[in-house]
Image (cartoon, helix red, strand yellow):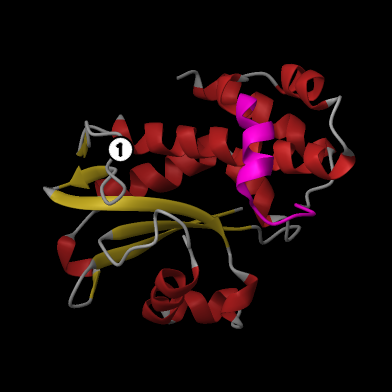
Amino acid sequence: MDLTRVEIELKKRWDYPYYWGHRQQDDWDKQTNFIYQTYSFERLLEKLSSLDKELINYGLNRWYNFWSAMAVEYLFATHPEVTPNKNKYDKLVDFSINGIPFDHKTSIFPKGFHHGFDFAKTHQNELITWLYANQSQQGRKHMANRLFVILYDTQKGEHWQLKAEIALLKKAIDAYINSFSPTKLSKTKTSLSDVIWMTR
């Protein structure tokens, strides 16, 4: 994967308002499934041009989130200390670090947490509990091991834009893996988990 190109393409999304306008649904997914084979932002706009405004926004956001997620997964999978899961259909495991299997989820700092950034940083277990309870309501909802990559924009509050900061994401992920220690993980009866913070 050409990470430099992915970052350039993703940042073109910043010039357009970021809102969903509609909750995720199968019908809208089917109408915008071309995002998976569309690499350039210009080509994406061409394919979206015949759709109505709400569906255009929906497609823009699906494309943006998908290609950011692919880049993050690549960052993990290509790190020398990480063993990627060869079974791409496994919803519980994306990769292993030091033999410990993890799913991963990249998210902007959640408004619904009802606490600020500083509180979350010093009460990380509370944030993790909230994330397990409130995220991934579809096929990836589970209580197995997970690494949460949380994005927080201290400059403009545009947390969503950080999904395009691939170089910064690489720096945060590499730093976490390079200093990885199982003793630092949050532990419950069913899972091991942790938060990787990425801020600007």
- Quadrant where the N terminus is found in the figure: top left
Closer-to-camera residue (116/130): 130
Query: Would you say 160 lies left or right of 99 here?
Result: right
| Dot 1 amino acid type | Tyr
Magenta residue span: 20-34
Closer-to-camera residue (56/11): 56
Location of residue 182 by image quarter: bottom left
**Is disc 1 surrounded by few (<14), some (14 to 19) or many (20+) residues within 10 Å?**
few
**Which residue was labeled with disc 1?**
89
Horizontal and vertical percent position of residue 188: 22, 77
Decide: is 66 above or below 24.
above
Decide: is 96 above or below 48.
below
Judging from the image, what secondary structure is the residue with disc 1 in?
Answer: loop
Closer-to-camera residue (135/98): 135
Horizontal and vertical percent position of residue 148: 41, 59
In the image, what residue occupies the spot 71% across and 37% down?
Answer: 59
In the image, what residue occupies the spot 50% across and 77% down?
Answer: 120
Decide: is 116 above or below 64.
below
Query: Would you say 180 lies left or right of 46 here?
Result: left
Location of residue 36 by image quarter: top right
